DNA sequence: TATTAACACGAAATCGTTTTCGAAGGCTGT
DNA sequence: ACAGCCTTCGAAAACGATTTCGTGTTAATA
């Protein structure tokens, strides 16, 4: 009942030819006579011969696997990136090995070391918050020093020389803030996180830039720095109650969604009394009530580009070390949580 | 600058011993003298020697990779399952290769064939709608006939003998419907999909069972069968307008979320005038306005169990063919879209 | 002193491919 | 008839590791 996979050796023995002949015949080599080729090919088809990927990988030193290391997969943005990566990789015959760092430095290191020992041809990754906090990138450096191509996306670092793909987070926050200012909002708050997260920092910068440009002075009271990207209901509730804001920009969508609930509970009307804009245009933004104006990060596109850059590096023979950083433009998607 | 990976051969040459000695020394074999072992181990540590996974895989015929084939990854439920799989697999030293079938039969087949040629030790998968529509499972049968362990979850079929993990979809729908009946709802509708999707069929069955049990006659008008799991706003809008329902059960959360918007636009109050219960307790359910009562599918648990069953099969030497189907109990999570 | 056993190590096969090189055998041309 | 040239194939190395089975040396025993 068990139909075990057949190998070149089996075919060779059965047809009383050598393994090399079989190998060549299946590659339609000119070296082998038409007769022999037909015989071997027919036999191979009959027994559904498929070459063993592992053996080929060992021979070629190419696995056709891409390692993707992300902090979390239950997160719409990362999920769309993975989809983009998978789509492009698939068209090029690559498989995607997904590893979750779970926002932990240690797991990120372990996962990468495991994969780096021949399992993959290159890495695409977004740094865990743990890594950004530790500010230790030796595991990345080791990988690149071994000649394994690496592409960082979204949560990146300048400490490592490699290809990078990000959106212009500062620009996104800037555009959002500007939009709020133009809608005559006077007290614009921001809910962000501690600065060690590269994206949060950039977004806060964009917010500050817009304020400055319009001659609005920054108020500490209007800036809420959450300890992490995790929800902390109490902090947000107090912030909205005490800060007297009439508009809030948040670095993810969940902070906005929850903020809107708090605001509504306080009897505030959205967007008349208070506007909201969130980062990451995910499902929640679209289906919240009211729907949330948000800054699209174009995750899928980001994934495609990352995969394209990586595979290009993998398959380029010449080892010219030139690293690019691709910066995507964020898009402001206006919905019902802002005026008009 | 490029620190290429070092192999046993390099160490052997450098230390003027044989490859076998190096291999044994690094495994701390009793065969090798203490002196030699220490020398070799020190050298290996110094040059950061790590065995090549591919070579080991070829030798052992074990890759320590699990292939996960799912219809879509931008989908909260599948995402949680993947996380569960990854978590468990990781503790057992396995990596997860994720392939997306994109709901297409062809892609599912191609992906599986690719992985089946030595890249993975076993499969965990959920059928694409394309496959369930075609009702063709030969690619699954071929895999199992080759002795590759397979675990199906959520979207399964009885045509293939293998381990399976599902939730009791019928029970979930039954519980939800019962809850609505007990809350004195008189016209309970359901938004489901065509019957070829195994889960939708089971959920519809549970809904019907509850009605029957309470002596409520089924009305065609109260059943909306969507062509797929994709949103079709027009169909839902018309259904709510015309069917005069005072409660709706939906086979996913997005149908409920959108349904609630339509209802509110029509001036209906939730849950006073109309109640909603959706399947798949995802982020949307929690953060919708009003929040959505829903049936939790326990995706992460499902992933863990799938991985556990698969790895158990992979690592069990004895080939006793016994297949289990694990049925998880759904949980009704009550929120503001139903009374109380 | 001769025999044996323990110890420490190496040669070679193996996993399944690919690829280089060489070698028969038939054929042509002179 | 013989050098030389295709045509067609096989042997063997290589990828990087594991493992079995020797084998040579030394120390212990009769």
Image (cartoon, coloured by chain):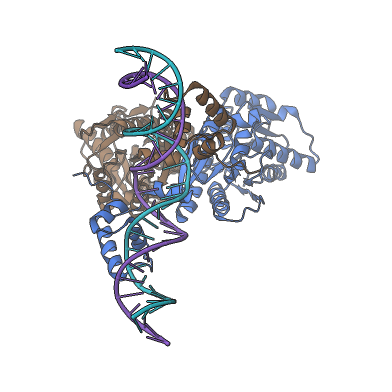
Chain colours: A blue, B brown, C purple, D cyan
Please give the name of the residue rendered at 45% of the width and 39% of the height, measured from the top-left corner: B53
Q: Quadrant of the C terminus of chain B?
A: top left
Numbered-mark total: 0
Place of residue A306 in the rendered image (x, y in percent of width and height, measured from the top left): 56, 49
Residue B168: image location, x then y, percent: 27, 32
B214, above or below A213, in the image: above
Residue positioned most to the right = A215
If the image is split into quadrants, where does the N terminus of chain B sit?
top right
Q: In the figure, A226 relative to B11: above or below?
A: above
Toward the viewer: A62 or A203?
Answer: A62
The answer to which quarter of the image holds residue B263 is top left
Q: Is residue A95 visible?
A: yes
Q: Is residue A260 left or right of residue B318?
A: right
Rendered location of residue A236, percent (x, y): 61, 26
**Residue A312 against residue B206 in the figure, above or below:** below
Instruction: Please give the name of the residue rendered at 26% of the width and 63% of the height, measured from the top-left corner.
Output: A42
Is residue A103 visible in the rendered structure shown here? no
Camera-side residue of A292 and B326: B326
């Amino acid at each position: 009942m068990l139909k075990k996979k057949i190998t070149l050796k089996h075919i060779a023995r059965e047809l009383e030819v050598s393994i090399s002949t079989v190998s060549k015949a299946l590659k339609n080599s000119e070296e082998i006579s038409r007769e022999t080729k037909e015989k071997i090919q027919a036999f191979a088809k009959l027994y559904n011969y498929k070459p063993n990927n592992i053996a080929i990988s060992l021979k070629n030193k190419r696995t056709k696997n891409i390692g993707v290391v992300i902090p979390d997969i239950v997160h719409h943005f990362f999920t769309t990136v993975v989809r983009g990566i998978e789509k492009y990789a698939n068209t090029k015959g690559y498989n995607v090995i997904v590893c979750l760092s779970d926002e932990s430095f240690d797991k990120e290191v372990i996962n990468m070391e495991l994969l780096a020992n021949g399992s993959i041809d290159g890495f695409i990754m977004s740094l865990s918050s743990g890594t950004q906090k530790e500010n230790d990138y030796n595991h990345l450096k080791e990988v690149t020093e071994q000649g394994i191509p690496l592409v960082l996306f979204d949560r990146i670092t300048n400490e490592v020389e490699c290809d990078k793909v990000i959106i212009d987070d500062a620009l996104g926050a800037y555009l959002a803030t500007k939009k709020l200012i133009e809608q005559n909002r006077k007290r614009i708050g921001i809910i962000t996180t501690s600065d060690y997260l590269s994206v949060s920092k950039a977004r806060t910068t964009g917010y500050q830039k817009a304020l400055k440009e319009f001659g609005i002075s920054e108020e500490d009271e209007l800036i809420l720095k959450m300890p992490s990207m995790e929800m902390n209901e109490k902090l947000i509730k107090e912030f909205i109650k005490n800060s007297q804001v009439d508009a809030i920009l948040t670095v993810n969508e969940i902070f906005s969604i929850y903020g809107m609930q708090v605001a509504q509970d306080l009897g505030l009307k959205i967007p008349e009394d208070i506007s909201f804009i969130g980062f990451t245009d995910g499902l929640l933004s679209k289906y919240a009530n009211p729907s949330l104006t948000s800054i699209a990060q174009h995750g899928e596109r980001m994934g495609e580009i990352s995969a394209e850059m990586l595979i290009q590096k993998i398959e380029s023979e010449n080892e010219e070390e030139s690293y690019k950083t691709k910066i995507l433009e964020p898009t402001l998607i206006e919905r019902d949580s802002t005026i008009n």
